[in-house]
Image (cartoon, rainbow, N blue to C red):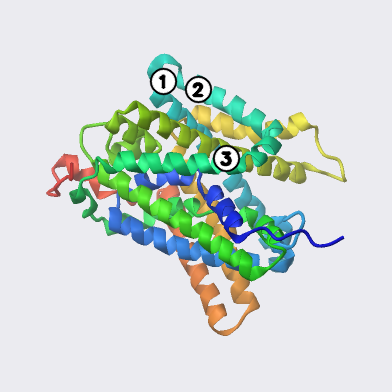
Amino acid sequence: MGQAPRASIISMAFVVTGNLLGAGILALPVNTGLSGFIPSLVSILLMWAAMFSTALILASQKHFAESPTADLPSFFGAELGAAGKWITVLANLVILYGLLTAYLSGAASVLEDILGAKVPGWALLAGFFLVASLLTVFGMKIMSRCNAVLMVFLFASFILLVIFAARFMKPERLVYTDWSYLPATLPIVVTAFHFHNIIPTICRSMNFDFKAAAKAMFIGMGIGFVMNSLWVLVAVGALPLAGSGSDTLLHTFQTNLPATVPLADLIRSPAFTIGAMMFALVAITTSFMANGTALLGFVSDLTTRNGRTPSRIVVLFLALGPPLLIALVYPAIFLKALDVVGGVGIVVIFGILPGVLLAKQHRGKLRLAGIVLVAVFSVVLLYEIGQETGMLQIEPAAEYWHTGSPHVVPQ
């Protein structure tokens, strides 16, 4: 049989961009915006370059890129030993469980903002969980066939949101900077550029042409860079940094909400509200389905013993039960969950470990590049661990503005 036709570079680029459009972009302006627009842009550029570099490293690994199963623990176990395998297992569980928890919390927040107090928050969360779980179990084939239509919808709705929000921008809001808060923004930025799980799919679709795959990833991540930067620009320019209202970046950060919620409260346009809700829910639902499917497969593999896999019900409970329970107990966990996902899980598997591989497999400049990547992602990891354990506390300067600080609040 002949080789299947190679997918076009632009089609794979859109696949990459589609995988970037998830909860990360919804959270980005809230976390990064508290450091100011210029520091936000610096962090976005830095993490874009770092994540693109590790994507190239993984795409160049034949045992990973050309694997029909793309088993991350086995791959890193073969390359880095038993420690690499089990670090990958734990970090992957952090990513998948954390993302599903964030999706549930974020979707419930969006629905609650639209419906108000008409429906209890727990009921909205449970309802979204039921729909998203059913789609994950039964709807992935249908969703994959509709992927092109969904991407067109997401791009169109994103443009609509940007146009609406741009009308409320004030240039003076873009000049504020809080560089000391920049390290705390990096985990969210890492999450916003995470697509690395699908690298084997991209390589197979490109018939293992590394240069073509690299171009597709560069273009796809480039589109993501433009969208993330533009979204931060209009959101930070439109939303007050601090103040007494609920439509400020600080209030949104403190209440763990997606950026679309305060923007809808600020703009108060039915068209924007509906567009924002649909953009957020479609992005979250498609991401939930992709990561939920990955988690089901991962849990099934972990619980298989001597060739015997637990029943489908047990696997569903072990995979989807914990995120539902955590989101119900801690409904305002959207931003915090994404911080842990990016600052711990993604940083370890798709940041530090690829850097270790590059340093191990090469000499000279490439070895130095691997060491630099390990250092950059290790700093993000250490900051996140310090924040989560209370050993390190980085607070946005906006926290103190309403308590007599001499700063001028850009309203």
Q: Is residue 219 visible?
A: yes
- How far separated are the C-alphas under marks 1 and 3? 27 Å
Question: Residues under labels 2 and 1: Cα distance?
Answer: 9 Å
Rendered location of residue 224, percent (x, y)? 47, 54
Q: Residue furthest top?
A: 118
Number of labels in the image equals: 3
Residue beneath the point at 56% across and 61% down = 217
Q: Which mark is on residue 124?
A: 2
Secondary structure of residue under mark 1: helix
Element at badge 3?
Answer: helix
- Residue 382 placed where, x, y %? 46, 59
Say which of 327 and 108 sits in front.
108
Q: Name the secondary structure under disc 2.
A: helix
Residue at the disc numbered 3 = 149
Q: Is residue 121 above or below residue 398?
A: above
Mark in the foreground, 2 or 1? 1
Residue at 44% of width from left, 31% of height from top?
A: 277
In the drawing, does residue 338 fall left or right of residue 30? right
Whole-percent x, y for residue 172 in the image: 18, 50
Tell me the mark number nearer the camera, choosing from 1 and 3.
Answer: 3
> Tags 2 and 1 in contact by the CB under 8 Å rule?
yes
Of tags 2 and 3, the one toward the viewer is 3
Residue sitting nearer the eye, 317 or 47 = 47
Which mark, residue 300? none
Q: Residue 52 or 382: which is nearer the viewer?
A: 52
* Neighbour tally class for label 1: few under 14, some 14-19, many 20 plus, Cα within 10 Å: few
The three-letter amino acid code for the residue at tag 3 is Val
Q: In the rendering, which numbered label is found on residue 115?
A: 1
Give above or below for 10 relative to 252: below
For the residue marked with disc 1, what is the amino acid? Leu
